[in-house]
Amino acid sequence: MGNVWQLMLWRILLGLLTLFAVSVLIFSGVQFLPGDFATEVLGQAATPEAIDAIRRSLGFDVPAYMRYFAWISDVARGHFGTAFASGRDVAELVAPRLANTMFLAAMTAAFAVPLSLTLGLLCAVFRDSWFDRAVSFVTLVSISFPEFFVAYVLVLWLAVDAGLFPVLSDISSQSTLAERIFVSVLPALTLTLGVLAHMTRMTKVSLVNLLDNQYIETARLKGNPEIVVLFRHALPNAWAPITNVVALNLAYLITGVVVVESVFVYPGLGQLMVDSVQIRDIPVVQTCALIFAATYVVVNLIADVVSVVTNPRILHPK
Amino acid sequence: MSMNTLFQGFLGRSRSAGGVTFSAGFGFLVISVYIVVAVFAPLIAPYGEAQIVGSQFEPWSAAFPLGTDNLGRDVLSRLIFGARNTIGIALAATLVAFGIGTTLGLLAATRGGLTDRLLSTFVNILMAIPLLIFALLLLALFGTSISSLIVIVALLESTRVFRVVRAVAMNVAVCDYVEAARLRGEGNIWVMVFEILPNLRAALLAEMGLRFCFIFLLISGLSFLGLGIQPPAADWGSMVKDYSALIAYGDITPLIPAMAIALLSVSVNLIVDWLLRT
C-alpha cells in the first residue's frame, strides 16, 4: 500500500503546485494592465484622487512579489477586496452566486452522470447495433452545437410551447428548495445535453477497449454469463478511466455554466463574471476567475486521486 | 480534379475503397455555400450591413424575409454579412493559433531538453485554467476589440495545437531519416521545416478542422455574451442575444443565426470525422 500513498501524495503536491501557478498567473494579469487603466475605468470620474485610490488598491507602490503574497494571504482569509462598480465587498457579492452555481452544477451532475454511464455501457455491450450508431451520431452532432442554441430550442419547446417551465430562472434568497429545482430544470437540462455526449462516448470507448482484452475472452470461455463478465471482470478495470471522464466533464460544467446562466439569467457566478467583464470590474473578475480555476484544478486532482485508488493494478502490485 | 483526389493528394496517401462519404459530402456542400455567401455578401444581401430599413422587430414579410431586428435593420442581410465576420474572425484566430502552436511544438520536439521542458510546463500551467474563464479574464484586462479578441483566442488555443504538434513531431523526430539529416549537418530549422513538418500534414489538417470548430464556437459564445465581435458589425452570436427576447413570443428568428453556427460546426466535424477514418 505504501506505493499508493506515495503516488497520491505526489499527485496532491502536483495539484497544489498547479494551483499556485494558476494564482500567480491570474494575479500577474493585473500587472500587465495598460498604464491608463485607472483613467479608463473611471471615465468621467477620473479625478487625480480617484486614480490614485485605484492604483493604491491595486498596490502599485510595492514590489510585485510582495503584492502577490499580500493578495494571496488576503484571499486565503476570504478577503477579496472591494468591487470597483458597487463598492461592495467582493466576498459578499460572490458567495450567494457561488452557492447558486454549485446548486446548478450538482443538479446537472445528478442528471448527467447516471444517464451517460448507462448509455455508454449499453453502447459498449451492443456495439455496432443501430442503438450504438444512433447514439454516436447524436453525440457527434450535439458536441458541435453551441450551448445557447440547445438552450433556446429547449426554451421554445418546454417553456414557450408546452408551458412547463419558466423562461427565466428567477431565484432570490427567499426561494424554497422546490422553487429552486423547478426554475433550474431547463438550465440543468441544457448543461446535461452538453456533457452527455462526451461522457457517453468516453465511457463506451474505455469499456470497448477493455472488452477486447484476452482475460475477458477467458472469462467468457469459462462459461460465465455476459453480465458477470461485464460487472465482475470488465468494470473493475474501467472505473479509473470512467471517473476521469466524469471529472473532466464536471470540470467542463464549470465553464459551461457561464453561457447557460446568461441565457436563463440565472443568478450564478458565471453571470456575475460576464457582467463584471463588461464593466471591467477587475477585483470581481479576478475573484471569479480564481474560484473557477481553483475548482477546475481541484476537480481534476480529485479525479487523479480517485483513478489511483480505484485502479486494481496499482492497488495490488505484483 | 475532383475534391476527393485533391484531398488524397494533399494527405499524401491513396485510399483503396470508398471516397467521400455521404456525410462528408454534405459537409463540403454546406461549407462551400457558406464560403460563397461570405465572399459575395454585398451582392447577395438585399440591404446594407448596418442600414436601418424599417421599424423595430417587424415580422417576416416579402420586403424583409426574416423581419427586422431591434434597431430596424434587415435580419436576412445581417445574417449574410454575419457569415463574413463570424467565419473570417474565427479563421484568422485559427491561423494565428496554428502559426504559434506549430512553431513552438516543432521547436520543443526538435530541440528537446530544456526548451521542451520549459515550453511544456508553461503550456500545462496555461491549460490548467478553463479556456473560457481565461478568455474572460483577459478580455476584462485588455478590453473588447476585434484585434484583442483574435490575439487572446489564438494564444489560448495555440496551447492545444502545441500539445498535438509536439506529440506527433516527437514520434517523427526519432526516425532514421531525421537522424540522417542531422548527420548531414543540417540545422534545427531545416530539420523542422523539411524533415518533420511534411509528415505532420495529415494530423495537422484534422486538428485544424477541430480547432476551427472550437474557436468558432468560443468566439460565437463570447459574442453571445456581448464580449466578442462588437456592434455595428453583424455577427451570429450577438444576433442570437439581440433577438433572444422574441423567443418568449414563440418567434424562431433568434434560432436562425444559432442554427447557422450549429450547421457550420456540424459540417466541419463531419469532414474531420471522415478525414480521421480514412
Image (cartoon, rainbow, N blue to C red):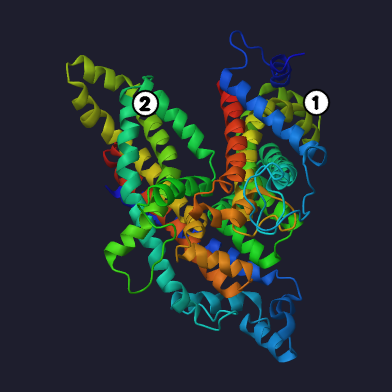
SS of the residue at dot 2?
helix
SS of the residue at dot 1?
loop
Query: Residue B125, image x and y in percent?
Result: 56, 55
Quarter of the figure with residue A197: top left
B79, A42: nearer the viewer? B79
Quarter of the figure with residue A86: bottom right
Quick one: which residue is furthest to the top in this view? Answer: B16
Q: Are marks 1 and 2 in contact (CB under 8 Å)?
A: no
- The correct choice, above or below, for A159 with respect to A95 in the image is above
Query: Residue B20, image x and y in percent?
Result: 62, 17
Residue B184 is tagged as: 1
Query: Residue A143, image x and y in percent?
Result: 50, 39
- Amino acid beneath label 1: Arg
Q: Is residue B151 left or right of residue B254?
A: right
- The correct choice, above or below, for B120 with respect to A91 in the image is above
Q: Is residue A43 left or right of residue A133?
A: right
Quarter of the figure with residue B271: top right
**Residue picked out by circle 2:** A208
Q: Is residue A28 left or right of residue A108?
A: right
